[in-house]
Amino acid sequence: MFEFKSLLEEIIEDNDLEMLTPSKDYTHDQQLYMEAYNQALKDIHSEFEQYYQEFMKKYHSFSLN
């Protein structure tokens, strides 16, 4: 799970950098696609964070029972 989170964060960061300083000329449609794709990745990351925290609380609690 940690590797998935790290990889997702790395991809988002790379995409953000590509949007700021493009490595080539993109068409308007390509730019829109990239923005939407990156937003979808950010949404996945947000949901993952939420569910991961719930998972950790539920399955990794310190209990003697």
Image: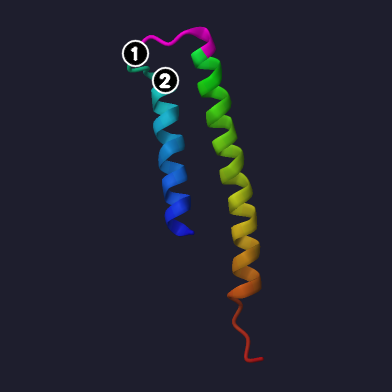
Callout 2: SS: helix
Q: Where 22 falls versus 5 (above or below)? A: above
Query: Is the C terminus in the top left, top right, bottom left or bottom right quadrant?
Result: bottom right
Magenta part, dominant SS: loop
Task: Say which amino acid is labelled 2.
Answer: Leu
Looking at the image, the residue that sits furthest to the bottom is: 64
Q: Residue at x 54, y 11 (%)?
A: 29
User: Which quadrant of the view contains residue 55?
Assistant: bottom right
Looking at the image, the residue that sits furthest to the left is: 23
Horizontal side of residue 59 vs 4, given as left or right = right
Please give the residue where the numbered disc 1 appears in the rendered image: 24
Q: Where 4 falls versus 32 (above or below)? A: below
Task: Say which amino acid is labelled 1.
Answer: Lys
Which mark is in front, 2 or 1? 1
Q: Residues within 10 Å of mark 2 (few under 14, many from 20)?
A: few
Please give the residue where the numbered disc 2 appears in the rendered image: 20
Q: Residue at x 52, y 8 (%)?
A: 28
Residue 57, percent across and down? 63, 70
User: Which quadrant of the view contains residue 51?
Assistant: bottom right
Q: Is residue 7 magenta?
A: no
Q: Residue at x 42, y 46 (%)?
A: 7
Q: Magenta segment, which residues?
A: 24-29
Residue 62, percent across and down? 59, 82
Number of labels in the image equals 2
Callout 1: SS: loop
Horizontal side of residue 60 vs 13, given as left or right = right
Residue 37, percent across and down? 54, 28
Q: Where 4 falls versus 8 (above or below)? A: below
